[in-house]
């Protein structure tokens, strides 16, 4: 009795365990059988436990043989017998018969033996028989009572705290997603819930529901609650919820937008949620949940599949999405406000519905499939604190750069483009006086050709670089004057020619005649970029300001300011370092840059590290993505290879988001 009730089967009794107990009890009875010498009363005390053991053992075999029957009545019979064994098949009951038999047959003549054995039995079997029979009655009632109200869909099995109720559904009728439910918990106040999904089965299918905070409508459901038993869950009319006037009521009226529930491991900045409904879920979409009473938005950046135990040995697989916090939208200010806490576990997560975006002049883009905009708060800071636009060919980098240039011009910031593609003059023709600029470029080209073959004893004075640099300086000096109304200057470094002298001249003999000469080299686009950048800084150095005055645009930056291991010649290393020094010093004089490139890995990190704003578009370059992960995190970096055209991960001073830009 002690081994069976305390060690072997303390919680759950199988029919096979019942057979083991009844067989061992029957063997014990027959070992002490003295039927021939017993009187009638002793034979009766022997027959009762023997017949009981045989009968219970027989029912246990019946339970085993009928549990998989195709007939519903036999299945119910098997389950009913299995439930009854929790009382009639326990070692306490079976071996109690043996103890009572032994007390009368062997110990009735000794008061001490009767007392000691009786006390030991009473201590061992001490239970609450009334509660046990009530529990059994409820289990039998669940199986056989037919007159359960039609609105009842099932019985409460367990709670996945907080806020999730697990329901064992007895009927075959499917409960649709979002169906309002009345949960009559015998141990807590009646609650309102909404059906979520099916997650497994044991004695019926297992349905999950989420509790919602609608205390003001509980009064309207009192009449329904009286008609259902304790522990039951019933359907209620959805019109009851539609009358609720609060945040919960407004959301629940559109409950079809529910995407999932908050999952474990959620942090202040990162949301994990178990996906309940996958319709329209994709990278970049916004989801919404509650933090306190605030409705906070997150952006989906990833997901994976998971499997968990939901009840006993029932497991179910699901998708777990990952989202990054964006903030609480302030409609009046058209911006997101930070919220510095996290949502409750199992709180509902709603997908922001697909909205038609209407272009806004102040916005540079919007969150995918919503009307939430992403704008440039400070166009001056965008220039002076430097901006990088990164991505492969054909995803719209140049168009984004052109959009930002137009905004800078509108703000009164002069723009100097170093464009190898000749695209900017066409796209920005409204701001570009081609006839005038062609004349200025011709002057620079003439300066570069004038002394192209001349060498000097001083290498710094040799070649046409001195005249070339002076021509560029004079052109930029005129352009950067405050009274000059022109706002856009464009150079193509690959089309500007000049020569440089690197070494001192050397003497040598030709046909027995001494001659002296120095070698001259054509400067590269990287060196031209340095000359233009340094000239711009020199012209702006005279005054320290807190706003942007000029912005350098490096189109195809990997060819203009390359990383040290990507240069075409040794001179390009020094030239890149010179351009980088300009950007490092330029902010206090109102000079910054926009860097546009296909190859993040091939651009000098000295400048890239100074970019406070980054637009990262589709990219397959692992080296570049590894670098970007330090800025935008691995979650956003992992989606770069799958970004559609005209979409970008946008990193500002305080926030990282994925947007779809709207220009073009």
Image: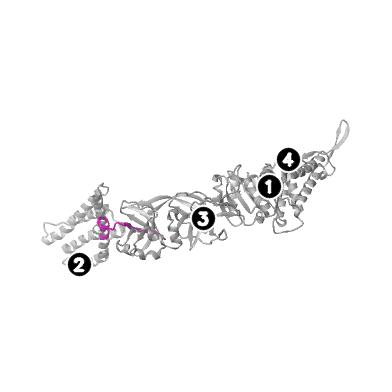
First in residue order: circle 2 vs circle 1: 2
Residue denoted by label 2:
114
Q: Which region of the structure is painted magenta?
A: 137-162
| Residue 147 is a magenta residue | yes
Task: State the separation of the CA atoms marked 3 and 1.
Answer: 40 Å
Q: Nearer the viewer, mark 1 or mark 4?
A: 1
Q: Which mark is residue 248?
A: none
Residue denoted by label 4:
495
First in residue order: circle 2 vs circle 3: 2
| Badge 3 element | strand
**Residue 140, x across and y down, in percent:** 25, 57
Displayed quadrant of residue 38? bottom left
Q: Nearer the viewer, mark 2 or mark 3?
A: 3
**Is residue 278 shown above or below 228?**
above
Residue denoted by label 1:
430
| Residue 201 is a magenta residue | no
First in residue order: circle 1 vs circle 4: 1
**Residue 412, x across and y down, in percent:** 69, 54
**Residue 426, x across and y down, in percent:** 67, 43
- CB of mark 2 within 8 Å of CB of mark 1? no
Q: Nearer the viewer, mark 3 or mark 1?
A: 1
Camera-nearest residue between 522 and 125:
522
| Badge 4 element | helix
Quadrant (top left/top right/bottom left/bottom right) for the N terminus:
bottom left
- CB of mark 2 within 8 Å of CB of mark 3? no
First in residue order: circle 3 vs circle 4: 3
Task: State the separation of the CA atoms marked 2 and 1.
Answer: 113 Å
Residue denoted by label 3:
298
Task: State the separation of the CA atoms marked 2 and 4.
Answer: 116 Å
Task: State the separation of the CA atoms marked 1 and 4.
Answer: 23 Å
């Amino acid at each position: 009795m002690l081994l069976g009730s305390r060690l072997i089967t303390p919680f759950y009794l199988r029919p096979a365990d019942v057979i083991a107990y009844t067989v061992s009890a029957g063997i014990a009875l027959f070992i002490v059988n003295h039927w021939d010498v017993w009187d009638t009363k002793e034979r009766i005390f022997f027959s009762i436990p023997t017949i009981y053991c045989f009968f219970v053992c027989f029912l246990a075999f019946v339970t085993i043989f009928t549990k998989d029957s195709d007939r519903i009545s036999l299945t119910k019979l098997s389950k009913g017998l299995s439930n009854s064994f929790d009382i009639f098949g326990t070692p306490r009951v079976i071996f109690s018969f043996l103890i009572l038999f032994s007390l009368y047959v062997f110990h009735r003549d000794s008061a001490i033996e009767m007392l000691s054995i009786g006390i030991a039995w009473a201590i061992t079997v001490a239970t609450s028989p009334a509660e046990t029979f009530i529990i059994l009655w409820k289990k039998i009632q669940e199986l056989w009572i037919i007159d359960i109200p039609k609105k009842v869909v099932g019985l409460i099995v367990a709670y996945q705290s907080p806020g999730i109720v697990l329901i064992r559904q007895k009927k075959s009728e499917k409960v649709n997603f979002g169906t309002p439910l009345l949960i009559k918990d015998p141990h807590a106040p009646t609650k309102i819930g909404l059906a979520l999904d099916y997650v497994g089965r044991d004695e019926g299918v297992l349905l999950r529901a989420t509790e919602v905070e609608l205390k003001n409508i509980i009064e309207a459901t009192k009449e329904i609650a009286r008609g259902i038993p304790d522990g039951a869950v019933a359907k209620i009319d959805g019109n009851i919820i539609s009358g609720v006037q609060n945040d919960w009521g407004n959301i629940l009226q559109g409950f079809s937008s529910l995407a999932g529930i908050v999952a474990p491991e959620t942090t202040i900045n990162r949301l994990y949620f178990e996906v309940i409904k996958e319709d329209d879920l994709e990278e970049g979409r916004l989801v919404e949940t509650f933090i306190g009473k605030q409705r906070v938005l997150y952006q989906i950046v990833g997901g994976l599949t998971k499997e968990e135990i939901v009840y006993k040995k029932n497991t179910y697989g699901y998708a777990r999405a990952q989202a990054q916090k964006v903030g609480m939208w302030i409609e009046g200010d058209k911006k997101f406000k930070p919220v510095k806490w996290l949502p409750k576990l199992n709180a509902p997560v709603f997908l922001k519905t697909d909205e038609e975006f209407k272009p806004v002049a102040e916005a540079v883009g919007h969150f995918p499939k919503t009307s939430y905009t992403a704008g440039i708060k400070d166009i001056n800071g965008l220039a002076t604190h430097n901006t990088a636009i990164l991505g492969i060919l054909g995803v719209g980098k140049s168009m984004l750069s052109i959009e930002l240039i137009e905004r800078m011009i509108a703000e009164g910031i002069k723009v100097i483009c170093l464009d190898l593609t000749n695209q900017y003059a066409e796209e920005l023709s409204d701001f570009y006086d081609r006839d005038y600029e062609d004349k200025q470029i011709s002057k620079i080209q003439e300066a570069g050709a004038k002394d192209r073959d001349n060498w000097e004893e001083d290498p710094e004075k040799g070649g046409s670089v001195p005249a070339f640099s002076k021509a560029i300086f004079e052109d930029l000096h005129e352009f950067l004057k405050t009274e000059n109304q022109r706002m856009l200057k464009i150079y193509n470094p690959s089309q500007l020619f000049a020569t440089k002298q690197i070494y001192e001249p050397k003497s040598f003999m030709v046909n027995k005649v001494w001659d002296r000469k120095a070698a001259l080299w054509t400067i590269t686009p990287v060196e031209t970029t340095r000359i233009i950048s340094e000239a711009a800084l020199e012209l702006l150095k005279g005054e320290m300001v807190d706003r942007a005055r000029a912005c350098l645009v490096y189109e195809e930056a990997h060819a203009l300011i390359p990383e040290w291991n990507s240069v075409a010649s040794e001179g390009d290393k020094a030239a890149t370092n010179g351009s980088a020094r300009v950007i490092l010093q330029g902010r206090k004089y109102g000079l910054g840059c926009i860097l546009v490139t296909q190859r993040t890995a091939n651009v000098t990190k000295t400048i890239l590290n100074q970019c406070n704003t980054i637009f990262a578009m589709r990219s397959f370059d692992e080296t570049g993505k590894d670098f970007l992960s330090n800025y935008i995190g691995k979650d956003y970096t992992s989606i770069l290879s799958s970004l559609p055209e005209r979409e970008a991960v946008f990193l500002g001073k305080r926030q990282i988001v994925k947007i779809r830009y709207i220009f073009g």
